Amino acid sequence: MDVAFAAKVFAALFAIMNPVANLPIFLSLTGGMGEAEQRRTAILVTATVATGCFVSAVAGEAILAFFGLDVNHFRLAGGLIVLLIALSMLHGQESATHGGSPSERAQFASAANVAFYPLAIPILLGPGTISALIVYAHQAAGTARLVALGAGMAGFIAVLGAALIAAPWIGRVLSPTVMTVTRRLMGMVLAAIAMEMLVASLRALFPGLA
């Protein structure tokens, strides 16, 4: 297994979905639930994200091919989306790409099932997450990297599930300052990942740049 590639996939998913910074959103949308219902919601969110990640990684490139899109062009667009999310995080703001517009956020609390919308989609499994997974799945050539891709995804899903289930306890322990620092730190990591995607796509589209 390519450990470095697995770590890259894990880091990208953690930076984009950022379970720590998104805990206050989870707690605010599930605040009126009992403990058992809150735990059930956390499990549903985790299962939905896991399914979405699997579908994006396995079928993402085929869907692009169906629409006649090249992975390198998509990687360029995905890199720009991820970079915009990273810049929002660095400025301490909620990205509208994942967090929704103000009018959409106003409707979140009245959603029929907050586990699917908005928690799983689009807050966690948004365009940035899907873009990164399709790009990494394209890079996962060979058994070692395919196993690493699965390991990185599984590792993050496990961390996400544990964080959501333990959200009430974590929310009492972590201060707003810690969550703010985490958001900005993940923004830096995400910006580096975005630049890597952009540079790789530009080199593939314009070989003379290499």
Image (cartoon, rainbow, N blue to C red):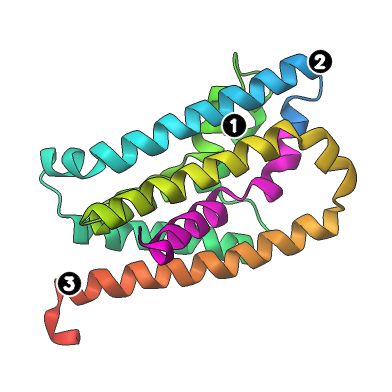
Q: Which residue is rendered at x = 21% and y = 59% of the image?
A: 73
On residue 119, which mark appears?
A: 1
Residue 101 appears in view: no
Residue range of the region highlighted in magenta in the rendering = 1-26
| Place of residue 134 in the rendered image (x, y in percent of width and height, measured from the top left) | 30, 49
Helix, strand or loop under label 2: loop
| Place of residue 119 in the rendered image (x, y in percent of width and height, measured from the top left) | 59, 31
Helix, strand or loop under label 3: helix
Mark 3 nearby-residue class (10 Å; few <14, some 14–19, many ≥20): few
| Residue identified by numbered label 3 | 204
Magenta span includes 171: no
Look at the magenta stretch and give its main secondary structure: helix
Tally of numbered discs: 3
Q: Quadrant of residue 52?
A: top left
| Residue identified by numbered label 2 | 34
Helix, strand or loop under label 1: helix
Q: Which residue is rendered at x = 50% and y = 52% of the image?
A: 13
| Place of residue 6 in the rendered image (x, y in percent of width and height, measured from the top left) | 42, 57
